[in-house]
Structure formats: structure tokens, C-alpha cells
Image: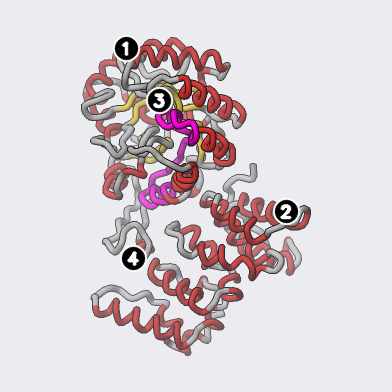
Amino acid sequence: MRLFDPHIHMTSRTTDDYISMGQAGIAAIVEPAFWLGQPRTHVGTFEDYFLSLLGWERFRASQFGIRHFCTLALNPKEANNSKLAAGVLDLLPRYLEKDGVVAVGEIGFDDQTEAEAACFSAQIELAKEFHLPVLIHTPHRDKKRGTERTLALVRDSGIRSELVLIDHNNEETLPLVLNSGCWAGHSIYPQTKMDEQRMVSLVKQYGGERIIINSAADWGVSDPLKVPKTVQAMVEAGISRETVGRIAWDNPVAFFRQSGRLDLDADEANLSVDQRRLWEGNSVLRGQSPVVQTSRDPYEPHPHS
Amino acid sequence: MLGNASLEVEHEEVAADVMAWLLPFQQRPVHELGRTALVLRAFEVWPPEEPVKFIDELFVRGDNAEREALLRTLPMLPDAGRFSVTAVEACRTNVLTVFDAIACENPYPARYFSELHFNQLVMKALFIGVSLRRIVCLSERITPGLRRMVRDHVKERTVADRPVHADTKLILNPLVTSGIR
């Protein structure tokens, strides 16, 4: 089964993770621009971050047979720094034009301040201008109320609901999001957010339509294999392979394809992992033995692939 | 949208001078030729006031595909030697497809790089396993300094019991070297 992790911060992860992800069947990922764990102090550091998502990280993923796309935005937390926010919003139009950008994100609420709401709205307008979908983070604190405010803001903006993915849902927020017509993301994240067994229960209750799962793996205690692990849990719980394949591949593909830029069939997509030419110097292997495999898919071909 | 299909031009289809121009773009994605045409057109229609800065900004703010197209465009630009700072900086990349764009099938390094920078390009190609046969006019830029670097490299690899790139012979053995362009 070909798998898609539509929310993972590979900048914070190692090459061991890329190898494990490839072996577990992950063929494509989306890396949203986010908070780096401590506040940035200059607009220019956002520009370098955007460029590394579009350049180095995309290439790094390709070396392990994984297609890398990104979403760019000013994240909710740093929207509260007014000096930074204006500069980053000015920077975004130049980078939203790039081929590897498949959505505006992650945007949304953190503390649910007025400054966050203003940046949230401004970036939905940018998404409309650039004909891109949006990836929306929902807050950890006061989550249900934050999700209700998010859905109200989305509705008022006039953006079509099929262009909106609301992320980090739980049992309380999922029905609200499904009723709105937006896509619903779930971050399977150790100890917080959502776990495999709770996700299985949600899928049994709500089915697979507009449901998306991701690892949201980052610099915290997180697990880049949560998509394959959740897929396994769903299969073991008797959920049909059709529904599982829909959640772990078809849905994220359908959502991000609305950007017109999710080019999964480009040459890179069909490359097997071949690092024979990367055995030293500036390759990420740094002198280690190369991994060469003829196929990156250890499982049977997915019926929808 | 020009797309990712690779460009294939038959020799009979176009005049020889146009073919020489198209050669670096053979087998490359069609969008790359499109990006090149845009840069060349920009120089014709509204020549930038500060061309060196203009080209460097396009490079710095480009994604991988944009950077690769720009590097293949450099030798076609008017007074191309002035853009060598960008070309040398491109060699410092970790992204192999970007390195290939300046190092391989591109006449720019042999024509405009200093000995130091040209030698570093050759050594990096050896380190990352790029065939030296892809470096345009390599034989014309072989110097005692480059031979010494390659000799030291071969010795270092041999002592460490590691494989040596077969193309080191192109630098060290003059008989082999005379066979390359």
C-alpha cells in the first residue's frame, strides 16, 4: 500500500527516519511551514526557511525515494509578533508562486488573539489570490471553541470548503468539521492530539470521506511512522482496505491536487533509491554505505495507485 | 504550463547554430527551456540596471528547478563572465541536481572559473561520483595543481582502502586525457 504523510516536519528529522519511512511504504509527504520551537527574530530567517523547504529538504527526501511538497505561511504563534508578521506576509506572494508549494499553511489560531485572526484572514485571501488550498492548524488550548471560531472565520472568508483542511482534530471537533464540508486532518502523535486506537474508533463511526491522517512529526517526542502504524491498526480492526487506502493516500492526493502542483508522476516519483553516486563528499550519507533498492514499495501495489 | 516532459530535438529538425544552443537542454524538462527563454528575453526587453545582482537574486531566491535552469542559462547571457560569483556559489550546493547544472554539459566553468574554483569543481565531482567526462573542456583546464590534488586524493582513498573513481585516470594519465574533449 502506497502511503502519504500530509503533515510532517522533516527539517527536524534524521536520515534514519527517511529510511524507515520509505521502508514502511511512505511515498509522498507534505511539510508545512511551522514554528521552529523558539521564536524567530528576523523576517529574513523565514525566507531562508521557505527556501530550505523548497530546495534542500525536497532534494533530501528524493534521495530516499520520497516525493516532498510543502505548504508555506506565517504560523499562528508567530502571527502575534507584529513586526515580523507584516514582513512575512509581504514575503509570501513571491514564494507561493513556486511549483513545490501545494497549499497555504499552517495558518489558524494558537492563543486566539485578534492579531492571529488578522493574519489568518489575510492568508486565506492570499490562498484565494494564488488559487491554493489552505491547511489550518487548530489550537491545543480551548480547542473546541478555537475550532468553532476557525470554522466561522473560514465561512466568512468565502473560500470554498473543499479547499480547506482543518487539522489536529479529536472526538469533540471532528463532527463540527465534517458538517462544515471541510476536510478533517488527524495528527497521530504520542501522548497528545490523537492515537491509533482512537483513530480506528473515529473511522468506524464516521467512515473515510474527507478523513486524513498524519504524523505531524517534528522536533518534539513524535513518531514519523504514525501513518503506517495507524494503517496497520485500521486493517487489524477490520476496516476495509478500500477505506484505509482512501484515508492514507487518495484523500490527501485529492486535497492537495487542487493546487494543480501535486505532480506525483514527475521523474523523481519513479526513481528507486539509488545513492551509489552519493557515497561521499556533500551527500547526506557522509561516507556511509549507500542504500540501493530496486523498488521502494515493500507491499503489494495499491489498487488506486 | 510547459510541464515535465523531456525535450527531444532531432538534429535534422533545426539549423546547426540553433542545435548548439539547444544541446544543454536535450533530455531536460521542457519547463527548463521555458525558464531560460524568460531570462534571455528579460535581458533583451528590459536589461536589468544591475545585471550581476539581478542574476544572483534569481539564483538565491529560486527553487531547485529555477536554479538549475538559471545555471544552464549563464553561458548564453551577454558578458557572461561577470556572473562567476553566482556560478561559483552554485558549486557549494548540497543539492546534486543543482551541482550537475553548473558542472555538467555546461561550458561556463571551463571558460570563466579561476584555477582554484575550477579545480574545486573537479574535486567535488570526484567526491560525489559525477563522471568527469561530463565536464566541458576539462582537458584544456588540467594543470599541475589539479594533477597534484587528484594524486593526493587517490593516495588518500587507497590508504583508507576505499574505491577510487575511475575517472581520476582522465586527469593523471595524459594518454587517456587526450581522448576527451
User: Crowding at label 4, few (<14), some or many (≥20) Cα neighbours within 10 Å?
Assistant: some
User: Is label 2 in contact with label 1 (beta carbons under 8 Å)?
Assistant: no
Does label 2 lie on the same chain as label 4? no
Please check the rendered image and state whether residue A79 is part of the magenta-colored stretch, yes or no: yes
Observer able to see residue A269: no
Name the residue carrying label 4.
A280
The disc, 3 or 4, on the residue closer to the chain's N-terminal end is 3
Cβ–Cβ below 8 Å for labels 3 and 4?
no
In percent of width and height, residue B170 lies at 45, 81
Nearest-to-viewer mark from 4 and 1 = 1
Task: Tell me, yes or no, whether the two marked residues, 3 and 1, touch with CB atoms within 8 Å.
Answer: no
Give the Cα separation between the discs numbered 3 and 4: 39 Å
Chain holding disc 4: A
The residue carrying mark 1 is: A172
B37 falls in the magenta region? no
Above or below for B150 versus B60: below
Write down the residue under mark 2: B42
* Mark 4 in CB contact with mark 1 (< 8 angstroms): no
Q: Residue at x 41, y 72 (%)?
A: B126
Q: Which residues are magenta?
A: A57-84
In the image, are marks 2 and 3 on the same chain?
Answer: no
Rounded to the nearest angstrom, the CA distance separating label 2 from label 1 is 55 Å
SS at badge 3: strand
Q: Residues within 10 Å of mark 1 (few under 14, many from 20)?
A: few
Q: Nearer the viewer, residue A98 or A85?
A: A85
Q: In the image shown, does B174 or A94 lie closer to the viewer?
A: A94
Question: Residue at point 64% right, 52% down?
Answer: B35
